[in-house]
Amino acid sequence: MDTAATVSGLSVSGLVKDFGGIRALNGANLEVVPGTVHGLVGQNGAGKSTLIKILAGIYQPDAGTIRINGESRSRLNPPLSEKLGIQFIHQERLLVPTLTVAESLYLGAEPRVGSWINRRSMNEQAVIALQEYFGLAISPNKLVRELTAAQQQTIQITRALLRKASILVLDEPTATLVKREVDLLFQTLQRLRQNGLTVIYISHYLNEIETLCDRVTVLRNGVDVATVEPRQTSMSAIVSLMIDRNIEDLFQKRPVALGDPVLQLRKLSHRSAFSDVSFTVHHGEILGVTGLIGSGAKEVVHALFGLERIREGQVLVNGREVRLSTPGQAVRRQIAYVPEHRREHGVALSFSVRENMTLASLREHSKAGILIERSERRKVAELIAKLSLLAPNQDSPVHQLSGGNQQKVVLGKWLSRKSALYILDEPTVGVDIGAKTEIYRIISELASQGAAILILSSDLLELLGLTDRILVFFRGKIAREFDAPTADSDALLSAVTGVTDQKAVSPRPKPKNPQITPITQI
């Protein structure tokens, strides 16, 4: 079975694309050497998605040239793009959950006998393809909805290869994968590269870019600002190219002046996820919470917003014991919650920026049940400026915004009303380095103004650079507490993974600019 139809190279030059008054691409160039893995990085809004959608034929460029296999094209359409051997693996898995593995692999290209689908042949070919490309044994009759995230990703890539892909474009392919699954994907991509496949790899995880890619192009404000070899270039230098500033500026230093307790937990227990949890968050404090999946950290955070039932224990807000059985009760106690999955739980994608940002504060912009649009628009304009939100206007649908700007809309929704405690669940997951910088600035400003902040995060750099204290959960309990400014990254990592013998951890100098490494990928 051939891996790729031909060894294919790709280049684009001078691509320009405007959306209303916003220029998404401003003369961007990209040169991909055949048979290599080429990284593409940049902030959300830098132009990555626009460039990829032009290659897919979804958008048409206003100017510029595309060359595939040495042949120039001024524009593409989806059938032509596929005919030329370009296949796309999107971050959202585009699979039909009720189809079988074999049906998903051969959808639209089923082997037939006359007008009938030859299911026996299709199932046999599916088994062979998955074994050859990934070394996997998955029943061809298994439904897609029964597969793990990694297996679904495998199905998408195998389907692309079966369609004779010569250029494979992967957009954030590891966002939902754990380390073992990431390793398997990398092994497969490296083998396919050796067989002549050309790969364009888009990721916010710079350690993946360093490990996998031969070259990487950095986009900023719609322009390619550099193409470098990641193994010969420091990640801090690449970050600086992305955000046009030094990585040292990622976290703002602030004076820490703790006030009275805002949140106090006393021997809080859940029916199964956690027990005997006690801690306090003060005015002006940023408290970090972390732990592996199943450690109980996620469930504690959910319980504080009424999303998990507390079996026993006390919760005090501003010194008064409260019940937090529903999100409504939490909101009335001035608790704000930014969820991990912004598209599913944080925003209404079809609503406008304005409508989303005032969802939590409609009463403040209403009189006798009637919305006062002038008041609403004035408040949203203030929030857009405060958040440095990039959107054409207040009435733009949120689904048109980049991931980082969607996250800012979620933050803006809670900033539109006064809250004493902000619970941020993985606030920068899937967000580029530039948007992270802005979100970190907003969080620091909230704490400086006296708000209490609780951050659940699996990003070690985020915890060490942003928080004042870090609580590590392990098997349903608080295993250790760290003073973040003086914490050692090795000790923190050991606590997260359950290593209690610190001597078993090989000491090494603490890097000046540590890599951004999510715990789920350790």
Image: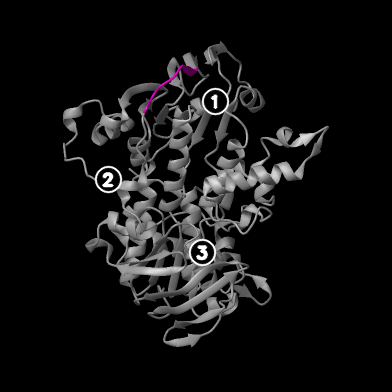
Q: Is residue 135 visible?
A: no
- In-image side of 450 versus 245 (left or right): right
Q: Which residue is mark 3?
A: 49
User: Is the residue under label 3 in contact with that under label 1 (CB below 8 Å)?
Assistant: no
User: Is the residue under label 3 in contact with that under label 2 (CB below 8 Å)?
Assistant: no
Residue 392 placement (x, y as % from top left): 62, 59
**Foreground: 231 or 494?**
231
Q: Residues within 10 Å of mark 2 (few under 14, many from 20)?
A: few
Tag 2: amino acid: Pro
Q: Residue at x 57, y 28 (%)?
A: 419
Q: Which residues are magenta?
A: 256-263
Q: Which residue is mark 2?
A: 514
Tag in front: 1 or 3 = 1
Residue 157 placement (x, y as % from top left): 47, 63
Q: Residues within 10 Å of mark 1 (few under 14, many from 20)?
A: many
- The CA distance from mark 1 to mark 2 is 32 Å
Residue 456 painted magenta: no
Q: Residue at x 32, y 23 (%)?
A: 480
**Foreground: 507 or 415?**
415
**Foreground: 383 or 125?**
383
Q: Disc 2 or 3, which lies upstream in sequence? A: 3
Tag 1: amino acid: Ala
Residue 427 placement (x, y as % from top left): 48, 40
Q: Residue at x 63, y 48 (%)?
A: 381
Q: Which residue is mark 1?
A: 420
